[in-house]
DNA sequence: GGTCGGCGGTGACAAATGTCACCGGTGGGC
DNA sequence: GCCCACCGGTGACATTTGTCACCGCCGACC
């Protein structure tokens, strides 16, 4: 029998992380060698313990799972990464795949599935939750230009145009043009609805 | 030794729920008699299995944890309820306590703590996460009148004033008055920022 | 070379929104 | 009875916003 798969587990919810660790410990060919409760901690633990597979929660303090995955790819190219997430926005999936994540799944999978997917990923395979994949495909690419996305993001929490203009280093008129065009492309009544729609599609 | 505590576990994230069940199974004085992945399912399982303690996730499809707790109180007055949640908005805590929830904790607690709290709740005690409690207290009561809250809620997703007016059965002018007054009370620049602030405080 | 899309900008106009004063009605508390 | 807060409304006004046309400047692509 070969040595067990060395796993790094990162999730800011202690309860979940502990439970997951306990669950994976039941699988004799898997071993959790490190745990972390935040993005930076995950990186530190990875450097120290050099896991073969990193199981990362999407939302974590400090750095989110995708940012950690990107860093890990630079630091430990041999370490396979997978993302586990509660709510799967399509945009996240795309970003994740771009930084080399090999597994992407919602927390609704069963423990047995998780263990299986870890093995798959470990041996070079990939796994993407079918439902999330379908959503991502149907969502398609963002119709927004990079700059439109920037400006829309700055408009996210009800910031008035004048402030957006300052923060983006643009003239107020230009900001309004971008917002108007973005809202038009998204079929939104105004920028606030546009923000909501873009968020729903994972374009923000 | 007395019979083990009969527990109902409700969480829509299969992975978490399973892991939790496995974890609680390690405690010999606790036994998970039922599991559910949605609000309605939780109620059905509760009716069928009559647990002593119901551990409910806050966000679930169908009915959220608090709604389930409220129903349970009617259906099974002897069943103690506790809410476990990822992100603890202060407003939720308040609503939870109002419907008789006896435990309210974030998912950042450890498994040992969870088991301890289940025992506490089972024997008639209460437990509220100190940090969430502090937030709730510092957040205080909503400064908004009921009607202001209604209108603000309708304004939530960028709905134009005209539509809010129709839905609320008010004149557009009145709607603007309410929104303006709400934004003023919250110190917000405009209604969208006001919505965000109210959400953050759990007042929405 | 030409064309086209993105970027940044201006100016002008209409529409939506924010703000204020002020109205009457109702109901609770002192 | 009086006061006060909330409800619902009107009218007027300034400000913010959305929308459109049109400008020049790249840079990529054919």
Image: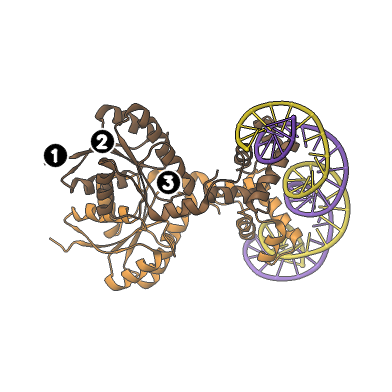
Chain colours: A orange, B brown, C yellow, D purple
Q: Reading the chain from its start, which is encountered first: label 1 or label 2?
A: 1
Q: How many marks?
A: 3
Can you tell which of label 3 and label 2 is closer to the viewer?
2
User: Which quadrant of the structure image shows residue B43?
Assistant: top left
- From the top left corner, tell me how far across and down residue B84 is, in percent: 36, 46
- From the top left corner, tell me how far across and down residue A63 is, in percent: 44, 64
Are circles 1 and 3 on residues that touch, CB within 8 Å? no
Disc 3 target residue: A132
Q: Nearer the viewer, residue A81 or B16?
A: B16
Disc 2 target residue: B52
Q: Chain of mark 1?
A: B
> Gap in Å between the C-alphas at discs 1 and 2?
14 Å
- B167 relative to C14, above or below: above
- B17 relative to B187, above or below: above
Q: Which mark is residue A80?
A: none
Q: Chain of mark 3?
A: A
A161 lies left or right of A46: right
Number of residues whose C-alpha sits closer than 10 Å to that of mark 2, classed few (under 14), some (14–19) or many (20 or more): many
> Gap in Å between the C-alphas at discs 3 and 2?
37 Å
Disc 1 target residue: B2
Q: Chain of mark 2?
A: B
Secondary element at tag 3: helix
- From the top left corner, tell me how far across and down residue B160 is, in percent: 69, 40
B195 lies left or right of A173: left
- A70 relative to A89, above or below: below
Q: Residue at x 46, y 43 (%)?
A: B94
> Gap in Å between the C-alphas at discs 1 and 3?
46 Å
């Amino acid at each position: 029998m070969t040595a067990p798969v060395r796993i790094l587990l990162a999730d800011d919810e202690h309860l979940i992380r502990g439970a997951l660790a306990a669950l994976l410990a039941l699988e004799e060919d898997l071993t959790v060698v490190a745990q972390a409760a935040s993005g930076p901690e995950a990186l530190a633990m990875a450097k120290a313990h050099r896991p073969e597979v990193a199981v990362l929660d999407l939302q974590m303090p400090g750095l989110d799972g995708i940012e950690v995955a990107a860093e890990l790819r630079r630091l430990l190219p041999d370490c396979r990464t997978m993302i586990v997430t509660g709510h799967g926005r399509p945009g996240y999936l795309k970003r994740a795949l771009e930084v080399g994540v090999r597994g992407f799944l919602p927390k609704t999978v069963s423990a047995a599935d998780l263990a299986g997917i870890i093995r798959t990923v470990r041996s070079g395979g990939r796994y993407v939750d079918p439902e999330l994949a379908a959503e991502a495909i149907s969502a398609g690419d963002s119709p927004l230009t990079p700059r439109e996305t920037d400006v829309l993001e700055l408009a996210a929490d009800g910031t008035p145009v004048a402030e957006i203009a300052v923060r983006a280093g643009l003239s107020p008129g230009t900001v309004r043009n971008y917002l108007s065009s973005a809202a038009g492309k998204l079929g939104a009544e105004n920028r606030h609805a546009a923000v909501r729609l873009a968020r729903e599609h994972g374009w923000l």
